[in-house]
Amino acid sequence: MAGLELLSDQGYRLDGRKATELRKLQARMGVFTQADGSAYLEQGNTKALAVVYGPHEMRGSRSRTLHDRAVINCQYSMATFSTAERKRRPHGDRKSTEMSLHLKQTFEAAVMTQLYPRSQIDIYVKILQSDGGNYSVCVNAATLAVIDAGIPMRDYVCACTVGFVDETPLADLCYAEENGGVSSLALALLPRGGQIALLQMDARLHQDHLETLIEAAMTACKGVSKVLDEVVRQHLQEASVLTGE
Amino acid sequence: VFEQNPCSCSHLLVIYDFIECTCFCNVRLCRYYKRLQTLVKDPRHDCVLFANEFQKYSYCPREKGESQEKWQTRCVYSAAVWYYNHLAGMMNIVMITEDPEAVAQLSCLTSGVYVISVQDYLQSFWSDLQAAHELFSSISQAQQETEGDDGEKEFPEHLPAEVLEAGIKSERYIQGTLNVNKHRAQNEAFVRPKNFSTKNLTWDVLVYGRKNRNRAVHGDEVVVELLPKNEWRGRDTALTDGDEKTGEDNESTPLPTGRIVGILQRNWRDYVVTFPTRDGIQSQSRNSQRILTIPWDQRIPKIRISTQQAEALQDHRVVVRIDSWESTSFYPNGHSVRVLGRAGELETEVQTILIENCIHILPFSDAQLREMPVNSLEKPWTVDASEVAERRDLRDSHLVFSIDPRGCEDVDDTLSIRKLPNRRLELGVHIADVTHFVKEGSLTDLEARSRATTYYLADRRYDMLPAVLSADLCSLLGGADRYAMSVLWELDAESLEVQEVWYGRTLIRSSYQLHYELAQALLNGEQVEVEELADLGPQEKGSKLAQLTEALEMLTHVARHLRAKRDRGGALELEGVEVGAQLDEERNITALVPRQPLEVHETVAECMIYANHWVARKIQEAFPNQALLRRHPPPQQELFKQLVDTAKAKGFTVDTRSNKALAASLDRAVDPQDPLVNRLFRMMATTAMSQALFYWLFHVHEFQCLALDRYTHFTSPIRRYADIVVHRLLTAALHMQRGVVSGKAPASNKEVEEMAHHVNSKNRAAQAAQMRSTALFQCLFFRDRDPQTDPCCVADAVVYSIRDNGVLPQLPWGRLTEVRLPYRAIGEVSCPRTQRPRLSKPGLKPATFRLQGKLPTLESRERTWSCSFSWPPLLFDLSKHFSDNFMVSAAGHRSY
């Protein structure tokens, strides 16, 4: 029946955030040396690791080769220890397949694939700790990894989830909120042009509210993009110092 | 800390001046949390909620191995310290906890922050607050008692909530509200299924016996499981819980019978109880501390409370709250909240009526009164120039007058009528513009909303709005400039059809403040003195009087036409006789007077009905989904059974399928020899009809008592909150029409729905309280009279129904009263043997009894048939007088 109070009258959420406040976002690029690009990203308690290989020649079945652009291959997985319940997560279950597909669609919209015809880009993402907003954290981490790999993109792809409670949109949901009966929406945005790379929602929501919800999601994504930009610049500075330029 | 005893907490928060911080707890008792929250949220209580866990300086992390309670106490303490420092030590902070360890540990850590227990707090800060002390001691006693006490299981356990929910979804169980039968509270209760339409159940589910009821109390939201068909049983037709069971033959056809498997929502409120007699206490239990108290409401089981004051409170009425009902206990446990006073005293009994109907009224607070405009001799209130520009000024163009009961202070409706040059009549209804003074969301508005209506008791009144508004600035007094909301119709002079309607805000000055008797006298052409014209010369007076009389005549003409139109549509003429108690200055009752109906009553009522109808049309068209409308729910056909049966016994058929059919058949059911027959039928029809309710969606069904498709309440904003809402809706509709975008969107559908529920329940409570208080005064009236000598105590009554062990008579005045005669009484009187079978045969013609009234003593405490716990408005002690009177009535048997 009456569940947790997701938004108190004072305007605080369960974890003390305000409605439009994002969780603390921390990231590092270039965490692996073997990979072409890699990044580690924390958004609150959700932690993800992204690795990018490529662009390289098509591996496996050559029949998938596209002659005008590169193929993007995504793989999403969750660590056994990522949730409260320890659980073996085999590859290729429905959830992760779906998530992989979403990631693939997102990055096909952002990466300038036409520059690399007949080649392949691999993006591997692993959730180390899951506390809501897995998709958006993966997208954000993968963006950094792709940038680290030096693959040209149209823009950063930033993603964020938003929920709708008591006529108010809540930005960047945590696990308790996602499971507390909130109708949530995930949005991946190319912030500079304001283009939507992916929008996913499978809850019920009144049509009238959709507009406000998308609006809130876009603002949240723009907030994320600022942080990511900061991280990239920081990384660049460090790298340039190391290379002695 | 606070969740432990919410009642005391509510008390403390009210009187707290400084801000108290409450920690968010993972509250297991969600309901208490909600209740606390609504208390804190109420702006009348001056409370602020401080989210200490989200504040940087008052947050403290939980240490390893620290228990939840400890940690929370520490959190609250650190918040208190922070607040003390925040105020720069200007004010001392008191933190209250029930944990003695915390008191010992924390009290001396910081100066200026005191940590004490509730008891110490009360003693040192509010030592003069007797009520709080009593409440605290009774709660703490009740808490001590509840520990321990492992006995045999008296009741089966309730099922867990998940099972119940799944059961309801799969239609295995039925969800509904428990309704205990007033006459057989021990055994019989009914559950009305919540979603009638989805199930095939067309009637209520019977829950028979204590075991099956399984600790549910009247009003609870319960879940029922149906028993197999062979265990179904009928309802008892006998009137009282007879100790001798006459067997199966006093049961009617079997009803679906069930047992309660779980309770979704307890709807416990405060109950008024009395203590058992002294010898009752001694025999009751081994433990004299715990006493079974007897609730005033028969439908509530006895409540066990622990107190040492039982002896002292022998004859008093006490307010009690139920805490719990364990499956091991035969009775629920509770604690006493406060003492009302000695039973039988007027003040106590009036308080009892208020509490039993959940009416809590405190005087208006200073903050609310500060919002009010001032109107005093030094600073008279005047009409605002900007308002004059905006409103239509009717002060000079219209003859406006009001007709109200004598001595009425809150005049909220006035009328006007005049001839227009183009062969038209202009009828106007002008209603006090309360919404101009009461802004939405203001403190006064909130208070008015929670009161929802003015409560009229027989001897007093509890206003919905402060007196400045209700008796002065909003009241449309004679000779004063007032703001109004008006509806003006242009009617064709011949056919009286509506040609044009105008709604809007106006400025009026009422010329005459008439009362009903005076208006009727003017209409009848009698020579009467009109107060407003007393000072004028005879010439002028004559012409003014002629003008007024002409207006009244026109008004009557129009009202007759409107009435006739509604009658053709099948409006029900319902009958309800009310008895007013006439009081002298010391509030003693001098006489009971039935209200005399005059034609002018009907005229005024008709105009108001018309205004309500047209406003309902307007707002429904403007806001199809949010309009607050009023209608009768479709009546339950089985309630008409009694009427149909009685009519059949008299040889009439009554068709109850629609309002039209019912009206027609009631018109036919007239006995030329006895006018009382028709009146009785109408009264019975009125009781069978369900009460009209507020709705938020427009929906037509065939039972429209007023024969109008849309109806609302618009004409009494001073004493009904619904009217204020309707006024706001009308204003919004007018704004919309003019294309003005108002600042605030109208209330959402859900808000209107909540409002409708709230207003409905408050209206019901107000009506019940009014009825009860009239009954109380009737009781008091008879108490002081000797039935043997006083002629007032003898009354004719018509027996309209005969049960196995009693009769239900109808007094000519007063509502359908109920006199319960134990059969034994009939057996004892020398009743001719031939009379008895005729008496007990169903469908027998009602006979007239000459009853002698003697009131039950108000002090009686036992719940037997002759007790006063539910003052049936009049209860006659027949056993004493029955013999000769019965003979009389048998001889003078009135034949119908």
Image (cartoon, coloured by chain):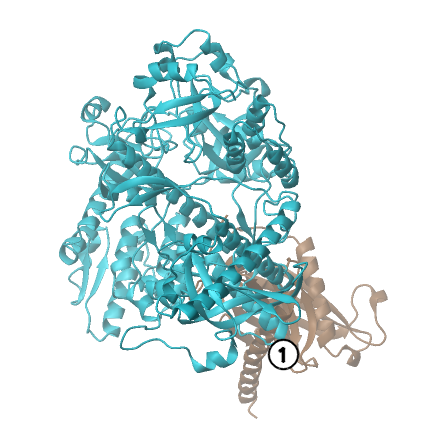
Along the horizontal axis of the image, is B346 left or right of A138? left
Q: Say which colour chain B has.
A: cyan
B604 or B67, which is in the foreground?
B604
| Residue picked out by circle 1 | A148
Q: Position of residue A75 (x, y in %)?
A: 68, 63
Furthest residue in direction top, as rendered:
B833
Q: Residue at x 62, y 46 (%)?
A: B567
Number of marks: 1
Instruction: Please state, as top left, top right, bottom left or bottom right, where the C terminus of chain A lies in the image.
Output: bottom right
Mark 1 neighbour density, 10 Å: few (under 14) some (14–19) many (20 or more): many
Along the horizontal axis of the image, is B633 left or right of B361? right
Q: Residue at x 64, y 39 (%)?
A: B197
B341 or B641, which is in the foreground?
B641
Q: Say which colour chain A has.
A: brown
Mark 1: which secondary structure?
helix
Q: Position of residue B504 (x, y in %)?
A: 55, 70
Q: Position of residue B326 (x, y in %)?
A: 36, 33
Q: Is residue B586 above or below residue B750?
A: above
Q: Amino acid at mark 1?
A: Asp
Q: Is residue B185 visible?
A: no
Along the horizontal axis of the image, is B379 left or right of B160? left
Q: Residue at x 38, y 66 (%)?
A: B532
Q: Residue at x 75, y 74 (%)?
A: A56
Q: Chain of mark 1?
A: A
